Amino acid sequence: MKENNAKVAFGGYLEQRGIYQRSDYFNQLNKETERNIHIGIDLWIEANTAIFSPLEGTIHSFKNNTNYGDYGPTIVLKHKIEDFEFYTLYGHLSLASIENLKVGAEVKQGEQIANLGTAEVNGDYPPHLHFQIIKDIEDYKGDYPGVSNQIDLEFYKLNCPDPNLLLKLNK
Ligand SMILES: [Zn+2]
């Protein structure tokens, strides 16, 4: 990022990664069940950067996911476009981001919903936002798998479409 004088780097949808092997939470010995395919998009930005909602919605849930290598503080928003409901997940936030939230509270398009967390709280990663679209969130609250194994990938590709459909970032 420094070489290109960039403020944000992004990508990673359906990227296969080795980094999850460092955490037992993700790692299993079987190659086909090892969760290492990323089903969100990552935006690498400085800690404390303000995060804005791309759409109007409501707070569905929030939680501090504290497993090593996990999201840390996380917010899930619920959206409804005509009769279609879906969710967006924001992971690796600051602790303060989830302090005064109320489930069901309305969020406007473009409203600040959070700040990006540091490595101390975000699961021990360089600061970045994990953003993911989720059609059916099942019973998850403030959490949803952000990586898939090979066996479940077809399901997750359908349930979690490319986040760039919404963000429309130029590659
Ligand atoms: Zn991610």
Image (cartoon, helix red, strand yellow):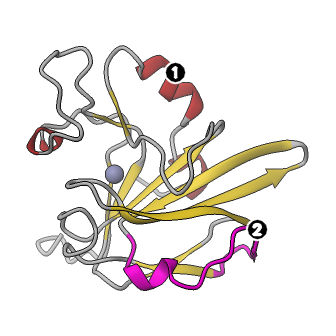
Say which residue appears at 42% left-offset and 46% top-offset. Answer: 40
What kind of secondary structure does the magenta stretch mostly adopt?
loop
Helix, strand or loop at disc 2? loop
**From which residue to which does the magenta span run?**
93-111
In the rendered view, does 50 fall on the left or right side of 81? Answer: left
What kind of residue is marked 1?
Phe
Q: Which mark is residue 104?
A: 2
Q: Within the image, what quadrant is residue 125 found in?
A: bottom left
Helix, strand or loop at disc 1? helix
In the rendered view, does 17 fall on the left or right side of 135? Answer: left
Q: Within the image, what quadrant is residue 91 found in?
A: bottom left
Q: Nearer the viewer, mark 2 or mark 1?
A: 2
Q: Position of residue 32 (x, y in %)?
A: 24, 14
Q: How many neighbours does mark 1 have within 10 angstroms: few (below 14), some (14-19), or many (20 or more)?
A: few
What kind of residue is marked 2?
Gly
Q: Position of residue 143 (x, y in %)?
A: 48, 51
Viewer-side residue, 103 vs 48 = 103
Say which residue appears at 54% left-offset and 65% top-offset. Answer: 62
Say which label, 2 or 1, has the lower sequence index: 2
Which residue was labeled with disc 1? 155
Q: Is residue 155 above or below residue 95?
A: above
Is mark 2 in CB contact (under 8 Å) with mark 1? no
